Image: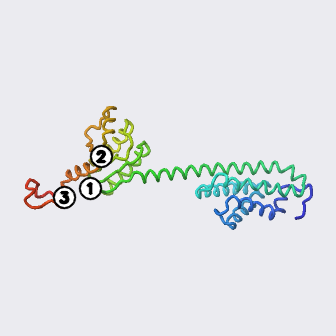
Amino acid sequence: MTDGPDDTSITELLGSWREPVLSRWIELVGESVRGRLTEGEVRSELAEIYGLVERAFGGDDTAAGELRATLAEISRGRARQGFSPTETAIGVFALKQSLYEQVRATRNQRAYSELIDFSSYVDELGLATFETYMSAREQVIADQAEQLLELSTPVVKIWDGVLGVPLVGTLDSARTQVVMETLLQTLVDTRSRYAVIDITGVPAVDTEVAQHLMKAVMAARLMGTHCVISGIRPQIAQTIVTLGIEFGDIVTKSSLADALAYVLERSGLRVVSSSAPRGGTTPHTPRNTPEV
């Protein structure tokens, strides 16, 4: 490499040193993302950024806007792909080290004096990149949390006209909202008349949880659906009595089996054992009552 004269600016050196500085930058970034991106992908990204940095640092406002937009898009992509903040930020900050190594090798005095300004400029780009990454990462986490909420609050069709809502874990406001939205939409789709909300998997029921359950039941009632709450264990029953929680006229059952038997009976169905004799052994059962 031919050394530049002592009065050559960094802007000019970025052009004349493009290949060695870019190659070293690619090497540094490649070490941090090895196995995550191919060398071709890294080279393509950094070559585009390098060209924009060269123009933007030279005073091209259009290039400056394009540079920030490009870095923002790359940062959002890194967040979605699961890269760490360090892996994302080093993609920008490593440019300083690459250029510094070249300046030190040539002992260019003017470049030395401008290196501080260039470092500050790259630091600003790096911070903007980091902020975009964190914002995108927070959105990814929020989306994943919403998906987990939806998965943890399924609404299943148990029988014609009967839905089941098995709840597992803590019932908070956000989850209650998901339960209501999913339940109401399924009621619209299936036109079910009964819904069994099973809280066997809910570790504890306090006043707040009871209020959330009441909201879900009332929302379903407005759709013309009769709700039953099952899974009222002895410990939960004692807590409900101690706290003075009133479920009003909402039907509660100790087990999911009892709740299902109740709604099936309300639906005009009855459950019989497959080994039970038929014929005259059930004279008190109405003839028009179907068996399950």
Q: Where is residue 183 in the image (x, y as percent from the top left)?
A: 35, 51
Q: Farthest residue toward the front?
A: 275
Judge left or right: residue 136 versus residue 165: right
Q: Earlier in the sequence, mark 3 or mark 2?
A: 2
Q: Farthest residue toward the bottom?
A: 40
Q: What element carries label 3?
A: loop
Q: Earlier in the sequence, mark 1 or mark 3?
A: 1
Spatial separation of the CA atoms under disc 1 and disc 3: 22 Å
Q: What element carries label 1?
A: loop
Residue for badge 3:
273
The answer to whether the residue labelled 3 contacts the one labelled 2, judged by CB atoms less than 8 Å apart, is: no
Residue neighbourhood size for the residue with mark 2, other residues' Cα within 10 Å, grouped as few (<14), some (14–19), many (≥20): many
In this rendering, which labeled residue sits more in front, label 1 or label 3? 3
Rendered image quadrant of residue 105: bottom right
Residue neighbourhood size for the residue with mark 1, other residues' Cα within 10 Å, grouped as few (<14), some (14–19), many (≥20): some
Q: Position of residue 74 (x, y in %)?
A: 65, 58
Residue for badge 2:
230
Q: Which amino acid does label 3 sit on?
A: Ser
Q: Which residue is drawn at 69% across and 54% down?
A: 68
Q: Position of residue 174 (x, y in %)?
A: 44, 44
Q: Which one is in front, 126 or 166?
A: 166
Spatial separation of the CA atoms under disc 2 and disc 1: 18 Å
Q: Which amino acid does label 1 sit on?
A: Gly
Spatial separation of the CA atoms under disc 3 and disc 2: 23 Å
The answer to whether the residue labelled 1 contacts the one labelled 3, judged by CB atoms less than 8 Å apart, is: no
Rendered image quadrant of residue 171: top left
In this rendering, which labeled residue sits more in front, label 3 or label 2? 3
Residue for badge 1:
161
Q: Earlier in the sequence, mark 2 or mark 1?
A: 1
Q: What residue type is labelled 2?
A: Ser
Residue neighbourhood size for the residue with mark 3, other residues' Cα within 10 Å, grouped as few (<14), some (14–19), many (≥20): few
